[in-house]
Image (cartoon, grey):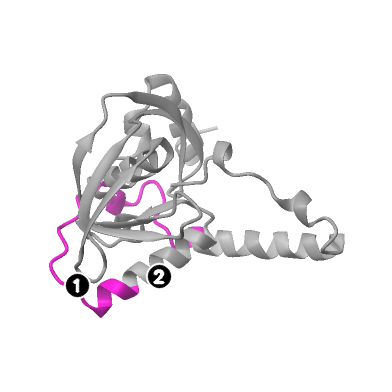
Amino acid sequence: MAHDEHHHHDHEHDHEHDHEPDEDAREKAESEARRRLAIAQIRQYGDPALRLKAHEVEEFDDDLRRLVDRMIVLMHEAQGVGLAATQVGVLRRLFVYEPDEDGPRAIVNPVVVERGDETLVDDEGCLSLQGVRVPVERSTSIVLEGKDPNGEDVRVELDAYGSRIVQHELDHLDGVLIIDRTDDEHRKEALSTLRPRAILR
């Protein structure tokens, strides 16, 4: 999932006195280059992997832990807050996410065990749908159970922002994208952004 602007504050003003302006510009350019490289490794809209259903993970081995580490690096470099295995072309039921300052987490074989009655519509972006933000309705509280990358049981209770992220990532594991969850008008608009080559001019 892409960063939500509401929750991502720009800290550049905090550093005004730390760096020369050209150093700030260089850092910005470097992080933008890293973001582009990361996005290039994340499957983009139209890739069939994004429409497939992922399978349960059965082996909690070094391969799985390496995949999780790689996904966390990609999520950070792409400047996202969540990334599902299907987005890197791996059909396994796991995702990584980072809703707050506590650091990134991975959940393997996630299952929703409780879902609050309240829902909220808010804009969402996706690392696999560049340039698209659409309103999506989500439950504002959710409880997930699953395993960590070592096979230990985990249970997480999430607030509105965290639950939005994990519902977005859970959708990816079932081949569902935000354009499937939004209204017709926003879907049409998003598709015209995603498929400009399909329009003959």
The C terminus - image quarter: top right
Gap in angstroms between the C-alphas marked 1 and 2: 16 Å
Quarter occupied by residue 188: top left
Instruction: Tell me, yes or no, if residue 109 can be seen here.
Output: no
Magenta: predominant secondary structure element?
loop
- The residue labelled by disc 1 is 60
Name which residue lies at 37% across and 36% down.
178
The one of 167 and 131 positioned closer to us in this rendering: 167
Residue 28 in the figure: left or right of residue 123: right
Q: Residues within 10 Å of mark 1 (few under 14, many from 20)?
A: some
Between 14 and 188, the one lying in front of the other is 14
**Above or below for 74 versus 114:** below
- The residue wearing badge 2 is 70
The amino acid type of the residue labelled 1 equals Phe
Find out whether the residues at labels 1 and 2 contact each other: C-beta distance under 8 Å.
no
Where are the magenta residues, as a range?
A: 39-66
* Residue 61 is covered by the magenta coloring: yes
SS for callout 2: helix
Q: Residue at x 39, y 71 (%)?
A: 69
Q: Is residue 106 magenta?
A: no
User: Looking at the image, which residue is at 53% across and 62% down?
Assistant: 77
Quarter of the image holding residue 66? Answer: bottom left
Q: Nearer the viewer, mark 1 or mark 2?
A: 1
Tell me the SS state at disc 1.
loop
In this image, 24 relative to 81: left or right? right
What residue is drawn where x is 28% and y is 38%? 142
The picture places residue 18, in percent across and down from the top left corner, at: 82, 63
Q: State whether residue 164 is above or below residue 37.
A: above
Q: Quadrant of residue 23?
A: bottom right
Q: Amino acid at mark 2?
A: Arg
Q: Is residue 65 above or below residue 153?
A: below
